[in-house]
Amino acid sequence: EVKLVESGGDLVQPGGSLRLSCAASGFTFSSYWMYWVRQAPGKGLVWVSRVNSDGSFTSYADSVRGRFTISRDNAKNMLYLQMNSLRAEDTAVYYCVRGVTMATITPFYHWGQGSLVTVSS
Amino acid sequence: EIVLTQSPGTLSLSPGERATLSCRASQSVGSNYLAWYQQKPGQAPRLLIYGASSRATDIPDRFSGSGSGTDFTLTISRLEPEDFAVYYCQQYGSSPWTFGQGTKVEIK
């Protein structure tokens, strides 16, 4: 069974930093692209970032580029999102996501339960 | 960036009725890389449809997707009580991946 378990969400002040983690199990983690998707309270879904299977390629939404960094540790089956210079508008539940297939182009199939990040003074 | 616009914002229907949800893209979605998700309160989204018309694993056949290019539709043939939720479309063929704003299907 595929499992994705996020952790690290917290209340942080504007301008602060936070690192989210996602523990993956039940599949060959090192074979899949991985994604972060967020959802602000009462709002819709927004793709944040992606990383390829070996961590050599990353991409970001314009709203987080230069502030957030996605990374992975395939030896530990872990995905990370380092978030710096946090803003109030970054407040959201952050989901760790895996696609249907190992391909670059794939819909999102497996989702974690989400980790809440609140940016407020 | 491909902008997806869903309509209506809210659909008020009774169990047993047919639901028709629309998703319109600002430009053609390559190879029909269009997905639909269902989300219930406090839960992560669940993939229903991908490739515009293929049902994901274990999705009941009352859910169907259609369309191509810029216009897509999710149809729920007969609403069951568990189908009342928010539905999102997503294009995954062109970065950045984008979602529609959602359609809420509520009990009338």
Image (tube, grey):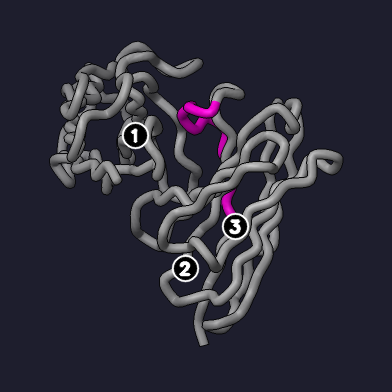
Q: Residue reaching furthest front?
A: A56
C-alpha span from label 1 to label 3: 24 Å
B105 or A48, which is in the foreground?
Answer: A48
Q: Residue reaching furthest bottom?
A: A121
Report the disc number at residue A115: 3
Have a look at marks 2 and 1 and say if they share a chain. Answer: no
Q: Which residues are magenta?
A: A104-115
Q: Amino acid at mark 2?
A: Asp
Q: Amino acid at mark 3?
A: Ser
Q: Horizontal placement of A91 versus A21: left or right?
A: left
Q: Residue reaching furthest right?
A: A75
Q: Can residue B102 be seen in the rendering of this structure?
A: no
Q: Chain of mark 3?
A: A
Q: Which residue is mark 1?
A: B91
Residue mark closest to the camera, 1 vs 3: 1
A104 or B102, which is in the foreground?
Answer: A104
Q: Horizontal placement of A110 versus B108: left or right?
A: right
Q: Position of residue A106 (x, y in %)?
A: 49, 27
Q: Position of residue B78 (x, y in %)?
A: 23, 19
Which quarter of the figure has residue B90?
A: top left
- Say which element carries label 1: strand
Give me the residue at 34% from left, 34% from top: B91
- As drawn, A107 above or below A49: above
Residue mark closest to the camera, 2 vs 1: 1
- As drawn, A8 above or below A100: below
Q: Amino acid at mark 1?
A: Gln
- Say which element carries label 3: strand
Q: Horizontal placement of A113 versus B102: left or right?
A: right
Q: Position of residue A54 (x, y in %)?
A: 72, 37
- Say which element carries label 2: helix
Q: Which residue is mark 2?
A: A90
